Amino acid sequence: MHWADVIADKLAANGSKHRIAAGITPSGEFHIGHLREILTGDIIARACRAKGLDAELVFIVDSSDPLRRVYKFLDEEYEKYIGHRLSLIPPPDQDGKPDYKAFQAGRTYATHFLEPFLEAINQIGVKLTIIDNFTSYKNGDFYPYAKMVCQEPEKIRDIIETISGRELSKDWFPWSPVDSKGSLDGVVVTGYEDPFVFWKDSHGVEGKSDISKGEGKLPWRIDWPARWGFNNISCEPFGKDHGTKGGSYSTGKVLAEFFGHEAPQPLTYEWIMLKGQGAMSSSSGNTIGPIEALDLVPPEILRFLIADTKPAKAIDFNAGMELVKLADSYERQAARDFGQELSVEGLSRRQLVSIEDAQQALKYSVVNEGESYQNAYVTFRHLSMLAQIKSSDEDIWSSLASSGSKVEISETLKDRLRRIRNWIQSHHFPDEMRIEILSSVPELVKSFDEQEKQVLENLIHLLKSADWQKDSINAAIPSSAKNLELSPKIAYRVAYICLMGVERGPRLAPILEQMDKEDIITQLSNCLSS
RNA sequence: GGGCCUGUAGCUUAGUCAGGUAGAGCGAUGGACUCUUAAUCCAUCGGUCGCGGGUUCGAACCCCGUCAGGCCCGCCA
């Protein structure tokens, strides 16, 4: 069974109404790692709906989290905002300096990073309800829970220390008040009398914080289980950092009981690594943004990456060869005839399961829920080659049509070509996919035997006298071998090695037609005389 | 120190939760198409399922141990 259906079944056993949560702190540029959080939740929600459950995905934006440090992409000026909540500080401008003007116009640090991500999510077909955590604090949604923990701080401390195995400092208190300058850092709690937490800050100032009005926040390990309560969360996927034993889910589960509700159905997922460069991280700049990715890949393929990979499996991704593999694998799956495969007699249980899982993964990859997936009948690899050879889209369509394949020139396909053109122009496009005519003699030429040298000589001769247009070029290549009563195969091999350094390649004639005749003859001659 | 994940064909992997003859893609090799769209089609080759033990009529799968790689245990999806 597909992983999302397994979870959906578990949820179905507990009731028919479900809220699935995703939560992210908008502390910097979002990247496709964050997409796994959202898409995992979205796919579960879709699986639930497919089973007739009433399921909704909510995205809880951790806008009340403080700025932890001055990240690489921020100017030193942000130093003064460390410890301040992300909803209350200005967004960075292009140089990473605080943009006070935008801030006055209502744009915050949190919304600055959130908006483009929401745009990407929308393009990917994810429907969700946004819950701004900072607003929840201000509205007093957290108040009943904050009150409970503030009344019994020792009990809460004991739960966290016992389960996580780490010792909390003696100043620890289950509420972080805002200090006189707006920071949550370095404030010592001196007392509690509902609804006020009394404090003394690092500047020596004393004050009180109203926990019913969000004048501060709960520490993460308490915040999480508390929000499960008033947001009615019944399922939440999270990264492996939270899932580890003694981690925040472990303590959250016990604290949820303390609050009087059940912890949501968990699902721990692995991280997305940037191939060869470790985990993605906004602070190190080691990222591919969702918008950037969508410039290169159609949304259904991005969905497929998550839908087709079991959550426990780490994903090694990049926008080069990994993307080629991913897109081609999607195309191959979409071309399968599942009805026919399932009708085969005597399938083992395993074969059956794998066919069904592949089918489900495709179903969950469709951008608009409920629609059926489209088969483009042409691989990314192939299209990217055509895009390099032909400058006009029309030439590509007629070329595809003349090949007699089942290709339909659909909007999907046009859209795909547009993205592929972006991709070819980007630095992500892998060198090994680039079509390039050589101007130096490649190593492989040395492997030529007498026959091949003869063919090469003949080819040069024929090309010299040919009209420089694709039909005559196209005729010259096989003739160079046929004249010697050899297989045309040899001629193609020779031509590809001399001109591109590889044994096989795309149709040569249209490419050569656009090159200078003399250059080609020179290159071939150099190969012959080497 | 505690914990999690991963290890299956040259490469990428499915299958491990519910034990029942190990599947696929890429690559390779051979062939077809009166010869090439890195195309398509057909066929072939290729696996001591990291290693050792146990449970079982039967183990890639369950249990114990072990090795290797990655990761988590302040924050991070």
Image (spheres, coloured by chain):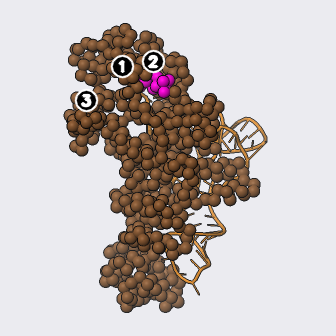
Magenta range? A219-231
Q: Earlier in the sequence, mark 3 or mark 2?
A: 3
* Residue that numbered label 3 is attached to: A81
Residue B69 image point, x, y percent: 47, 43
> Which amino acid type is marked by label 3?
Tyr
Tell me, by letter, which chain the rendering colours orange: B
Q: Which residue is mark 1?
A: A213
Q: Earlier in the sequence, mark 2 or mark 1?
A: 2
Occupied quadrant, residue A96: top left
Q: Residue at x 49, y 63 (%)?
A: A410
Relative side of A310 to A113, left or right: right
Secondary structure found at label 1: loop
Same subunit, tags 1 and 3: yes
- Cα separation between marks 2 and 1: 13 Å
The residue lying toward the viewer, choosing from A125 and A176, is A125
Image quadrant occupied by the N terminus of chain A: top right
Instruction: Name above or below for residue A229 compared with residue A306.
Output: above
A236 falls in the magenta region: no
The quarter of the displayed image where residue A418 is located: bottom left
Q: Colour of chain A?
A: brown
**Residue A74 shows in the view:** no
